[in-house]
Amino acid sequence: MLSLDLIVVMPVYNEQASVRKVVQEWFTEIENWTENFIILAIDDGSTDGTHSILERIREQRGERLEVITRENRGHGQSCMQGYRIAAERNASFVMQIDSDGQCDPQYFFRLWRLREGYDVIYGVRKRRDDGMKRVIASRVLQMVVFAASGAWCADANVPYRLMKTKAVAPAFKNIPSNFFLANVGLATVLRKDKTIRHGTVPIHFRERYGGEPSVPLAKFGGRASELVTQLRTIIYK
């Protein structure tokens, strides 16, 4: 079996209102650029109808949609599981999107056409429809990351990212299983690695199609000190 061009990692938690539309629109877009891909939906212990919806879509889409079900361990750790699977399968590239509809597939081609020139490309949220509080939270997070690690990340927690699997896989081992914001930890480790080539593409981050965020704003604030400690542990170990 030939290695995959792309594995799209999509963590899912209680997104029955949005997940069908998200999967369908991403399939439509990615098929314009490659047929050698899968969307890997990681159901992080959903308690609503999300899993049943995913299974029905899988019956329609076949082997290019894979569904993994696990006990709830959090968004970031779901992403890391997907990234590691991409590395195990020798996929050329791994991309992360969220399942709530905020990641607009119209920007995918802008990242895809830059894929050979960079090891990681972030879709930086220049316009956002999810409210000023979220904008402020991202700015505060950027400063916290810089203060804790010395790494200036364009958008450390953005879900819209395309990575060259072989180049970034060595960094996966630096992210422990208890890291709350694992994507932030990974972005920080990659930013500190001088061999990693970073690219950015401006994107418009949409409003959610429905449901509630899996990581409420209150959790970000309440665990800021934990994030600082964890970042320093992985950066300065």
Image (spheres, helix red, strand yellow):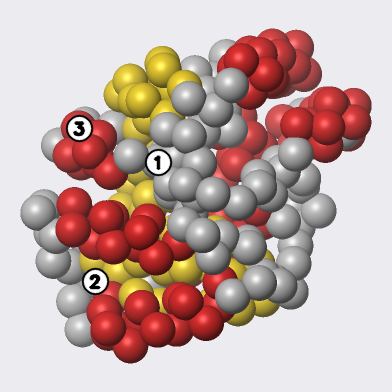
Indicate whether 207 appears above or below 39: above
Residue at image location 42% in from the left, 29% down from the top: 205
Indicate whether 167 appears above or below 47: above
| Label 3 with label 1: CB-CB less than 8 Å | no
Q: Indicate the amino acid at tag 3.
A: Arg
Residue at image location 77% in from the left, 47% down from the top: 179
Residue that carries the numbered disc 2 in the rendered image: 3
Q: Position of residue 34 (x, y in %)?
A: 13, 59
Residue 107 seen from this side = yes
Between 43 and 47, the residue placed more toward the observer is 47
**Corner quadrant of residue 131:** top right
Residue that carries the numbered disc 1 in the rendered image: 103
96 sits to left or right of 162? right
- Badge nearest the viewer, 2 or 3: 3
Between 105 and 116, the residue placed more toward the observer is 105
- Sooner in the amino-acid sequence: mark 2 or mark 3: 2
- Sooner in the amino-acid sequence: mark 3 or mark 1: 1
Residue at image location 77% in from the left, 45% down from the top: 180
Determine the secondary structure under disc 2: loop
Q: Indicate the amino acid at tag 2.
A: Ser
Q: Which mark is residue 110?
A: 3
Determine the secondary structure under disc 3: helix
- Badge nearest the viewer, 3 or 1: 1
- Sooner in the amino-acid sequence: mark 2 or mark 1: 2
Residue at image location 34% in from the left, 25% down from the top: 203
Q: Position of residue 177 (x, y in %)?
A: 75, 57
Q: Residues within 10 Å of mark 3 (few under 14, many from 20)?
A: some
Between 118 and 202, the residue placed more toward the observer is 202
- Badge nearest the viewer, 2 or 1: 1
Quadrant in which the C terminus appears: top right
The residues bearing labels 3 and 1 have C-alpha atoms spaced at a distance of: 13 Å
